[in-house]
Amino acid sequence: MRLSDLKVGQKGIIDLVDLDGSIKRRLLDLGFVPGTEIKSVRKSPAGSPIVFELRDTLIALRKKEAYQIFVETK
């Protein structure tokens, strides 16, 4: 399942970050690594950005980046 498809309040485990370059490096530095639990917290009315909770931190991602991160749902 794609990270952008998680419903608000739903949790998942990061499986794959399918991005390239500096965006991938930045997300990995922020903790978006395989095996990490992530929770969808809030979505804007337009659907982008989406707020996620990851390692006790809230991080907002654009939908296009969240679409390229794959998670396994709990």
Image (tube, rainbow, N blue to C red):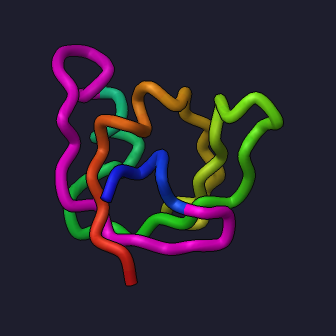
Residue at image location 76% in from the left, 29% down from the top = 46
Is 24 a magenta residue?
Answer: yes
Is 29 a magenta residue?
Answer: no
Residue at image location 72% in from the left, 45% down from the top = 43
Furthest residue to the bottom?
Answer: 74
**Residue 20 image position (x, y, % from top left):** 17, 20
Q: Nearer the viewer, residue 47 or 62?
A: 47
Left/right placement of residue 8 relative to residue 18 reads right
State which quadrant residue 69 falls in.
top left
Residue at image location 28% in from the left, 70% down from the top = 72
The residue range painted magenta reads 7-25
Furthest residue to the top?
Answer: 21
Left/right placement of residue 19 relative to residue 65 reads left
**Residue 8 image position (x, y, % from top left):** 67, 63
Considering the image in quadrants, where does the C terminus appear? Answer: bottom left
Left/right placement of residue 36 relative to residue 34 reads right
Q: Nearer the viewer, residue 8 or 35?
A: 8
State which quadrant residue 28 falls in.
top left
**Residue 62 image position (x, y, % from top left):** 55, 27
Q: How many numbered marks are there?
A: 0
**Residue 38 image position (x, y, % from top left):** 46, 65
Relative vertical location of residue 45 with respect to residue 32 in this rendering, above or below: above
Left/right placement of residue 58 relative to residue 36 reads right
Considering the image in quadrants, where does the N terminus appear? Answer: bottom left
Residue at image location 32% in from the left, 70% down from the top = 13
